[in-house]
Image (cartoon, rainbow, N blue to C red):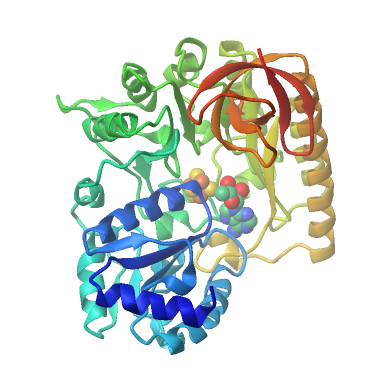
Amino acid sequence: MSDLKSEQSGQAAREAGAPKKLFIKTYGCQMNVYDSERMAEALGGQGYEPTEDMAQADMILLNTCHIREKAAEKVYHELGRLRPLKDAKPDLKIGVAGCVAQAEGEEIMRRQPLVDLVVGPQSYHRLPQLEAKAGKGGKAIDTDFPEEDKFEHLVARPKARRAPAAFLTVQEGCDKFCAFCVVPYTRGAEVSRPVDRVLGEARDLVERGVREITLLGQNVNAYHGEDAKGRTRTLAQLIWALNEIDGLERIRFTTSHPNDMSEDLIEAHGTCAKLMPYLHLPVQSGSDHILKRMNRSHTAESYLRVIERIRAARPDILLSSDFIVGFPEESDADFEATLELIREVRYGQAYSFKYSSRPGTPAAERALVDEGAASERLARIQALLTEQQREVQDEMIGREVSVMFERKGRHEGQMVGKSEYLHAVHVGDNPAQVGDIRRVRIIGSTTNSLRGALI
Ligand code: 5AD
Ligand code: SF4
């Protein structure tokens, strides 16, 4: 449909009292994916329903991420590209949410007047009021860290069916202040949601067809939510409580800090049947000098000891991590120490990034390493991580795994799902339904996924 036609049909639909359309573009981490769902629900009460087609939208929200390079510039660029849509439909509301909204605040409206609404990650529950203000032609902005709990206001939802795998935010913010990271500034101090709220939301998800829940938090293993008796509960205790929910089959959590891998959480990996054998545990660097300058408050050795304990509890666990190369002062020897740590751990999967300075963080004051050296290190670390990923995938061939199917594949009769190790697995001639969990034998490995056959 041409933009003009879709605009005309959108106009007709609005005149007929049909719901308004909301388009959300989500950048960055899984927490933003979760937040986008909650924003859609908050605006559902204002008569908005989601659309996949930007040209149909009455409101466009960019849910932004500030973690890496030139995040704000990319948002301004994207906003500039919305100009023709706004010109064609002056009623169109444009909003910026997420961490760039938090960091830039009013500056966004100054630099890009087509923006009607700016909302930070702690204020999504106020979206209905903000939308109403923007609807009257005003400019609406909220980047507070309010006293009230935003999650409390986001519970009234229609009982629509859900995809079988869902995210659930249990903790937000971070008190660690790694020298490169904006999270403590954009998401604020560490806050845990109460146990009962989390369990209530999990039960609700299960009623709606969810079988796997990934607990989210910037520092999820620092979780310390209160239970109904006022006791502080750990992430492991929360997982054990979730383990009791009938119909919930799989539990995961991300992202964790090595120093918060407590004994009970490590033990749960060996004893809790629903907790999946996959752990994302960022280390960032293998050099103690760099780790110190990053303010990570752990050493390479202490990280390796944590990995050792986790593997003792669950020998087949698949490990993942984040790495930053080219951090200020990183020498060749520091970088070699990182490669050494990678060889020692053997990751099944990992992310690596070239350091980019984030304004307002302590490391932003420091001299950068040579750009060419940083690029070369990134290429080398990625080659090693890819090699390990391929090896770990190849070792799966011949093994039996359990796969939860999430969607149809590209080929006739094919279904795609995730193994307990979070590998994507494609299975042909597959009569399974979305949400089914089946035993599968792995028969092949490709770049980023495995092929399997039902047993
Ligand atoms: N530069 C590069 N990578 C960064 N990350 C966070 N901040 C920066 C930065 N300034 C990476 C870290 C973190 C992941 C989510 O993003 O590796 O674990
Ligand atoms: Fe950022 Fe993670 Fe460090 Fe917190 S622990 S400051 S979120 S990198």
Q: Indicate the quadrant containing the C terminus: top left, top right, bottom left or bottom right.
A: top right
- Please indicate whether residue 252 sits to the left or right of residue 50 in the image: right
| Image location (x, y in percent) of residue 419 | 60, 25
163 up-or-down from 301: above or below = below
**Residue at image x 63%, y 25%?**
430
Can residue 379 be seen in this snapshot?
yes
Give the x, y percent position of residue 357.
61, 64
Q: Is residue 393 above or below residue 40?
A: above
Residue placed most toward the observer, 51 or 352: 51
At horizontal 52% and vertical 59% (from top left) the residue drawn is 27
Number of marks in the rendered image: 0
Give whichever of 244, 305 is nearer the camera.
Answer: 244
Q: Is residue 294 visible?
A: no
Indicate whether 160 appears above or below 340: below
Q: Is residue 382 left or right of residue 192?
A: right
Left or right side of 296 for 213:
left
| Front residue (pair 299, 389) | 389
Q: Which corner quadrant of the image does residue 222 belong to?
A: top left
Measuring 44% from the left and 53% from the top, which residue is drawn there? 32
Residue 348 x, y percent position in the rendering: 70, 30
What residue lies at 32% left-to-right and 72% top-to-bottom?
13
Residue 421: percent from left, percent from top: 61, 25
